[in-house]
């Protein structure tokens, strides 16, 4: 049997693998859409895996061919969803809800008053909130001396009083009182 004939005979395995992996075609479609894909993309991955298996088919292992293809096909579909279903790579341990909480901010590169390319940065930081906090911090610290500002910044970075004292060349008690 040629690879083409085997492929046509076993093409039903693609739908079977989708049903086994996702429960139903409808659920597979929903999962694909949640990952910026279509059901056809998953089916294509399944067909590609089936074709690769048909190309290296060993007639002596005909009894285990279906199970071998199904196992690899389900893995390939899951891998496709994870690796190509998101615009950026995220750990497999991150849930779908956590992926949706990640903020994506556009960074535009301007050249001669035109946007050249749209770049994207992934950030868990709420930029608007951070900007407001920065302005508030500047207002509060504007009445302080420069050394006092440095002490506050170092405390915020996690330095101990002793480390700050050594770094700024003053006694620990001075750091504590300022």
Image (tube, rainbow, N blue to C red):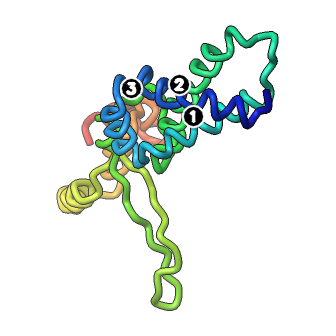
Whichever of labels 3 and 1 marks the residue nearer the N terminus, that label is 3
Residue 43 at x, y = what percent?
51, 39
Numbered circle sitting on residue 22: 3
Q: Position of residue 39 (x, y in %)?
A: 42, 43
Could you say which is closer to the camera, residue 146 or residue 24?
24
- Position of the N terminus, as image quadrant, is top right
Would you say 55 lies left or right of 105 here? right
Q: Is 114 displayed left or right of 69 in the figure?
A: left
Q: Residue at x 67, y 10 (%)?
A: 64
Residue 116: x percent and y percent?
A: 52, 79
Distance from label 2 to label 1 (Cα)? 8 Å
Residue holding disc 1? 46
The foreground one among 167 and 84 is: 84
Q: Position of residue 42 (x, y in %)?
A: 49, 39
Judging from the image, what secondary structure is the residue with disc 3 in? Answer: helix
Residue 74, which numbered label?
2
Disc 3 crowd rating (10 Å Cα; few below 14, some 14-19, many 20+) is some
Is 110 placed above or below 129 here? below
In the foreground, 65 or 122: 65
Tell me which residue sits at (31%, 42%) in the image. Answer: 100
Q: Nearer the viewer, mark 2 or mark 1?
A: 1
Question: What element does badge 1 sit on?
Answer: helix
Residue 112: which disc?
Answer: none
């Amino acid at each position: 049997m040629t690879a083409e004939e085997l492929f046509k005979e076993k093409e039903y395995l693609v739908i079977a693998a989708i049903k086994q992996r996702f429960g139903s075609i409808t659920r597979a479609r929903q999962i694909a859409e949640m990952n910026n894909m279509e059901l056809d993309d998953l089916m294509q991955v399944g067909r590609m895996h089936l074709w690769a298996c048909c190309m290296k088919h060993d007639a002596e292992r005909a009894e285990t061919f279906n199970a071998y293809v199904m196992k690899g096909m389900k893995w390939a579909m899951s891998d496709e969803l994870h690796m190509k279903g998101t615009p950026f790579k995220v750990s497999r341990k991150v849930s779908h809800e956590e992926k949706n909480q990640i903020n994506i901010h556009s960074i535009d590169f301007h050249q001669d008053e035109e946007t050249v390319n749209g770049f994207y940065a992934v950030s868990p930081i709420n930029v608007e909130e951070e900007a407001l906090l920065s302005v508030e911090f500047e207002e509060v610290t504007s009445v302080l001396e420069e050394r006092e500002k440095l002490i506050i910044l170092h405390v915020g970075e996690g330095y101990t009083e002793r480390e700050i004292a050594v770094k700024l060349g003053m006694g620990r008690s001075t750091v504590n009182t300022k």
